[in-house]
Amino acid sequence: MAGHHLVLGQMEDFLTGRMIDDTHDERYRQMIARLLVTDKGFAKSDIESNCRLQVRAGEKRGLLTAAFLVRMKAKVVILIHYGAGSLVTRHRPALAMSRLVAPYQVPLVVVTNGRQADLLDGKTGKLLGRGFASIPSRTELEQKWETFDFAPLDERRRQIESRIAFAYEIDDSCPCDDTTCRL
């Protein structure tokens, strides 16, 4: 057992080809990676998986993991946050993470538990769509490119978002969760 995940053996990571632990959560993440490449038209090199992000709340620090960052033209355009359970409870911390993984607001945020997905506007948090079909393809993102605002976020806003992410994902995490880490 790794953390609270039942390890079912080993599997090949779709994006990297490395052998990784086969868990129920990892099977969902692999399904999402395949969807991004085979159905949505992204290259494997456009997708970064298991992205570590340091967050801070005052003197407290921790590490979070974003399931995927999808890049185009050297910019992160989609952050995908995976977590078991209710999607609604993951919206706010995913939006906070999308304001920390780059110096600008990531335009689109996907929150998923592997069975369902919500697509959010990164800037407003507005629900743009439900289901994996709502995740835009590479072609659709190219057509929308000019509408994306990559203006830098101010440091005060980033500090607030870091506190929010810490409160939701670190303070409220299960002690055996191996996707977060208190520093």
Image (cartoon, rainbow, N blue to C red):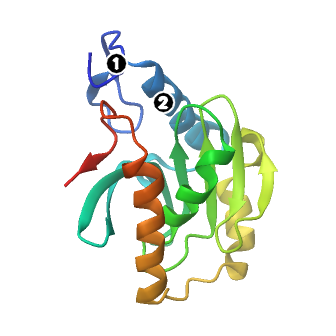
C-alpha separation, residue under disc 2 versus residue under disc 1: 10 Å
**Residue picked out by circle 2:** 30
User: Is residue 155 depicted above or below 93 in this figure?
Assistant: below
- Helix, strand or loop at label 2? It is helix
Mark 2 surroundings within 10 Å by alpha-carbon count, few (fewer than 14), some (14 through 19), many (20 or more)? some
Q: Amino acid at mark 2?
A: Gln
> Considering the image in quadrants, where does the N terminus appear?
top left
Q: Is residue 90 left or right of residue 66?
A: right
**Residue picked out by circle 1:** 11
**Residue located farthest toward the left when viewing the structure as drawn:** 183
User: Is residue 58 depicted above or below 24 in this figure?
Assistant: below
Residue for point 40% across, 19% down: 23
Q: Is residue 134 left or right of residue 43?
A: right
Q: Position of residue 133 (x, y in %)?
A: 77, 41
> Considering the image in quadrants, where does the C terminus appear?
bottom left
Dots 2, 1 in contact, CB < 8 A:
yes
Q: Is residue 3 left or right of residue 149?
A: left
Mark 1 surroundings within 10 Å by alpha-carbon count, few (fewer than 14), some (14 through 19), many (20 or more)? some
Q: Position of residue 132 (x, y in %)?
A: 71, 39
Q: Amino acid at mark 1?
A: Met
Residue for point 54% across, 32% down: 84
Number of marks in picture: 2
Instruction: Kindly identify which numbered label has been placed on residue 156.
Output: none
Residue for point 55% across, 76% down: 105
